[in-house]
Amino acid sequence: GSYGEVSNDRSLREPFDFRSNEEQVTSAAVMDNQRHVVWYELGLWATDQFRQRMAWALSELITVVPENIDSLTYTEVYAKYYDIFVNNAFGNYFDIMKLVSYSPLMAEHLTYVKSRSRPYIYRKEDKRVSSPDENYAREIMQLFTIGLYVLNEDGTQVFDSSTGEPKQTYTNEDIESFARAWTAFDRNPVRGNYEDRRTGGADNRLDPMKVIAAYRDPFPKPDLTGGFLGDRFLRCVDLPSQSFLKKGAVYTLRGGSPLSEYRTDPSQYATDDAEKFVLDTTSSLYQLLSNGGQYELTVKLEEDLVCTGTECNVDTVRMVKVDSVYYEFKERPCVQMTFYNDGKQIRGRENRDLGSMCANPNLAHSSEACCRDERFQEVRSATKETGVTYFYEGERTKYNTAKDRCVNAGKDLCMFEYTRVSPVDEWWKTGYSWTNKDCEIMVKVNQEGYIAVVHDADISYKNEIDRYGIPAEVDEYETLNWFKVQWDGDFPGSSPENSCAVNKCKVHSDGSCVCKTSVSESTVFDSIDNVDKEQVMAQLFLGAIGPDATSVPISGAGFIAHVVDGLIDASTVFEVEDKGRTFYLKNIVSEVHLNGWEAVPTILEAEDATVFQNVTIQESTTLSASNGRYINFDATDEAYVTWDVTVSYTGDYSMSFRYALDTFTRQMEVYVNDEAVKWTSPNANPIIDLDYINGNPQDNVGFEPMTRCQGDCDIDDHCAAGLFCFQVNKGDSAYPGCNNAVGHGSDFCVDPNDIDNMLFLPTGGSRDDWRLTEGKIVHLVEGVNTIKVKVPFGNDRRPTFDYMKIEGLSSPIIASKFRNPPHFVAIIAEENSYTEQNTVDAQYETDALLEHLVYHDNVAPFLTIRFAQRFGVSNPSPRYVKTCAQAFKTGLYESGSQSFGDGSYGSLAALSACVLLDREATDGALYEDPAFGSLREPIIMVMNLLRSMEFSNTLPTEGLDGPPLAESYNARLMEMDEKIGQSPHDFPSVFSFFLPEYIPEAGPALSAQLAAPEALILDMPKIIGIQNGMISLIKYGLSDCNNGFGLYPGYKGCSDNGLYERSIGHLARVPSATTIAEMVSEVSLLLTAGRLSQDNRDTIEAACSSEPDYDAQFRCIQQLIVFTTEFHSTNTMQKSGESRSVDTTTDVTSTEPYKGLVYLYLSGGTDSFHMLAPHSCAPINVYERFRAIRGKNSLSEGIGLKMEEMLVINGNNPDQPCSTFGIHPNLPVLQTLYNDGDAAFVANAGLMSEPVDVNNYKQTIGQLFAHNDMTSNTQKVDLFDEFFGTGIQGRIADVLTGKGLPVNVFSISGTQVVNVGELGGAAPFIISSSGLPDFNKNPSISDMDTIIFELNNATRKDSGFFAETFANKLCEAMTFHELLKMELDAVDVSTIFPDGGLGDQFKMVAKLMKTRESRGVVRDMFYVSQGGYDTHSNMQMNLVDKFTTLNAALEAFVAEVKAQGLWESVTLVQFSEFARTLDPNTGDGSDHAWGANHFHIGGGLAGGKVRGLYPDDFEQSSTNLIALSRGRMVPTYPWDAMWKGTAEWFGIAEGPEMDKVLPMHSNFPGKTYNAEELYNN
């Protein structure tokens, strides 16, 4: 079962159904409503109402949207998610964010489930380039933690002094960085005992997700403060030796399975052939874990233990066997440093395996493979011996441990061909092994200063990236894994004056530099004078395990310095307390310095050589040679090759060769410009005589290995350690280190240190097993040099050559350095995923990111404002915010003698107590302040009515005909999201029901610029819906009567008689009052907290006193009070004494012909490059570029439209890079209209305040790539806020109304800023797509509408702003509802529209157009929308569905408008907040971008043309001025381009009128279209 789950109680009413593999008998509507019923039941009957209320507020902040989840009609998974908030309502916010982040519902909703890293996809899917899903990385910051803009502690915004704009908390680069940390999450397998349909593709949406470490991006992640995730963590190299025995070590019981849960190990580790790490029963660790047979689930060491037996031989452990059970060791959190000195190369079980790369020798990241470089057979087969050189399967050691074990076994470490394990050798005994090859970590720097890690390792077998050899993620030519560092000084390639060449680094074709590196560590503070806590936290980033035992604590300004020997130096540890956390920090900084080459490396391939004496250049059949060819030497000792090498200066150079050798160690002579080059080793031995022993002494019993210069040997094993058998084929051959008087052509044991020619050690094979020699110094002269390589006299079995490398010596770059970045997950990958990347490290990184976000300075004020708004204060004062922010940070809040919170940062108990108990929340006098308070949430008002009026679910069955009915029901409120705009679990988007910053479009709140989030859904359909529902609930009980909140129960009719015969529950409160005045006071107290004004009390008393009986009067009072502003807001109302009127007259007439403008918004950010794609393009093949960036390769078609599936159109624009384009195949209506001249596109357009490119795009006002900001600003088209709070259609209406043209503005999709004009302008109408229901049908009292108006009469200026907002909207809604309903009921359309969604919206637009004459207008503007375009995953499949729906709706709309004879008079313009990345993410989706393609249609258009400028290159580069990362296009044209001509056609004149409608259009000369260009007339 699930945490907190309770057993079923059959004595309770109404059972719940659940989804399973059995036949479903309950209707989908009832199944879908079950999760709502659970919420309503708890809201009604739970005893912990504050906890439930807090949980609701949390759920509104941290939303999941059922429409984004493939389990709409499930109950348990949603209840489980909601329980996160119930269980932790007064807990810690960090815990909530961690539980939420591991929730499979959140991961599905925000699409990071199964998100995989770029290197993983690149390796597994044939170099497919993709990026991690960015959705959660963005929303967890914007919506759940830090918000968009930097806040002071009191919640006020921080402004950028240079621009005057609010400072943004993060950039898109930060999102890309953190998206890499949200990879690796996946659902767990299905299990029993929870609600699910277990099919082949079923996924567990209930249990917390697992982390698949191989999916995680391992590279450093820059944070929001200029540092990195992992800063101030302990370095892994600083862990205490044998940390598995040290205090704090954690062991987790795994039962009888020896398989790790933190790593991906072969299943064979569980077999008897696998070596287990069995604890000695006398060891302290055994005694602790065994616990006398009482095995604990988790054991944490409270003190250091002493090792026993084999424990003393290992660096670390994984699984340890204790009796018959296993415990897994969990290393404490630590970070690895990306760059380090003295790296060593590691490789897989065979040199052909993926994974030739560098590793830090001071970390236990590899294992031993024992062999000696000079011994051919050992190189061919390095050994691992159970119980001697390794002690358990999967063991990892540090480099020195591996070397010591091999030396003690009589061998060493070498560059082996493959490894073999004894006594049992199986394929699954895999993993990395250390070699003795030095390996350098280099850096690749792009033109933005981002870096990628490069491992300068040997590729032994092949050069096919990610199939063999170096993984692409660290390969110089393949890596795409860039991340940001903070440069100290300019970086190479930052300018032409500071180019790669100037810095003596390699330069790549993309302009990036590749440089060598070295790492230094230096002391930061040498004194603590004038040092404070902020300086310590800003300059110290390396964690320490704690102060030295001999140190002395010295208090500083907000810190303690633990000083050894009285000196502030590298041994000093700083102790800092910050937000409840204790940091121990080393007083050192690790920095990476860049080095170049005096001459960058030059590769001279085999085909560049001149060959002599039967030397041949041969083709490499296995493609193992770097360029496909290699040099094969003939057996003769006269064979040689030459290369001509051109250098730019005279001096020393390093020379090396890539070679293969399938025999014993060999030497080659080297000549430079015909002079022999010799290299004398500092370890060379004195020359001694050859000692030739007749016969084959090695065959004798008791044979001792031969010493130096002894022979005749046959194999290396005949020679003593450190020697090899030097083989020749001529009697007068030379023997290194030996007096050659009597050689006889025999073979003698020699020391490699005595060879002064170029030494070639065995590699294992002569065609595929390559390695690079150590570089040897040669002296070259400026110009052309000839290098000759020759087989020495008498030698045979020579190596084959792939290439020669010449490079200058190292040259430091003094000015270029950066701080060494930490990372959690090892940068060590293997083809079969048996890697050093483990789950624990990935989880630690996740925790670090969550901590970084939750402990951000913005979180406390951000959450305070959000919770204050949910608890009744829409605009909390700075003092209030600061007080509660401090409570959140300190974890304590005191009120009187009571203290709330546990004293820990992030305490929701402290925050919620402050929000509710601060004087701003409790001082009743504040409610007289007109700017104080809020509108109330619709669902809270409904629950208030239900609870206060004592909802009863017991049926009044007396007098009902028919068979007996159930006596009680659950609280089945149905379809509340449609009726009132809110329903538990049914959030419309990730932004919840409201936008926190929303300001109403009219009234005093707009003038005062006060937020009223709830006003966002205070539109006509929702107002009518909630009022109808509450009236019905009061009169008829919970039923369907007159659009009530319930469903038809199957019996009786609707009667306002107090019997509730048609209900499944009713309001059962019996008032305690005896007079009508007392009843009004009682209901006022319960529903308005006593705020009901005396005027309204009097009005209600007078209206209800004529009711025939006490119960009818009580129902009347309830009905009227729920229409008051005091019920709908927390304000008090001060009436002016004047009646409220709503102007419905049109004072002007016009002879202008009718025109209609329809604004179609595709919400979520449409992937519009999937709507309009390149087709035939020349001279640049834009289509191929398009397919490439959309992920096409040999294994995948990617996500780009295929040419053969496009609906082809002619561009008809010579400025475009393509003559033809392709429309998505599911949008044939656009092709038809385009070919008819009734549709056109504008390519690569977007929201801009002025023309920008990649160099200055960040100066664009607003939060690019963020849904809410871009949606709002796209609808406003006024980034400088010259006409604050208005939208473009609202401003058009203002101008036209001022010119005497009667205008109506409608939204068929809720309240939208696009329709908002200035105060006094034409008020926009909000109409439901389903039409208009009756309002207050069969009123209980006469003239009830008049009385409702009287209750909401005009107010004084000092009346509550929120009360006035509701009163105004209510009266407008009632008035216009009546008028529009009458007109709409009188018309119909002749075209059949598709049911639901966009089809219903267009149908309503068409019906409204038919009422134009009765409304007396000549201009209409409409807003319709279609959601679901936020395609972070499965973009292609989702757009097929969306475009199919869009196409059907457009076809019907066009047909109907033509049938009405209005086609020439109507224009539809399509917008979306932004386009999406052309580069797909790992979920086959696309993320937020910018520049988009959009269309308009209409009978008057001069269509059939693609305007704007379609990009011809989508890749980011130094020469592409419009391409950001991942194919995010900077717009070439503004939204104003289409709007200008459209506005002119609609009646807006150039000059002041256009300046108001499009305040930014003059910033784009030549980039906007006038009406003459866009229209035929």
Image (cartoon, rainbow, N blue to C red):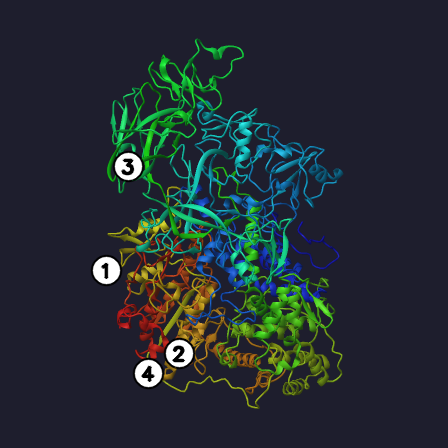
Any part of residue 1207 in sight = yes
Q: Amino acid at mark 3?
A: Leu
Q: Mark 2 or mark 3: which comes first in sequence?
A: 3
Residue 1293: mark: 2
Q: Is residue 264 above or below residue 1480?
A: above
Disc 2, disc 3: CB below 8 Å? no
Foreground tag (2 vs 1):
1
Q: Quadrant of the C terminus?
A: bottom left
Q: Mark 4 or mark 1: which comes first in sequence?
A: 4
- Between 915 and 930, the one lying in front of the other is 915
949 vs 29, left or right, is right
**Residue marked by disc 1:** 1214
Disc 3, disc 4: CB below 8 Å? no
- Residue at position x 66%, y 58% in the image: 87
Foreground tag (4 vs 1):
1
Foreground tag (3 vs 4):
3
Which percent across, then down, holds residue 1239? 32, 64
Element at badge 1?
loop
Pointer 2: residues within 10 angstroms few (<14), some, or many (20+)? many
Pointer 4: residues within 10 angstroms few (<14), some, or many (20+)? few
**Residue marked by disc 3:** 780
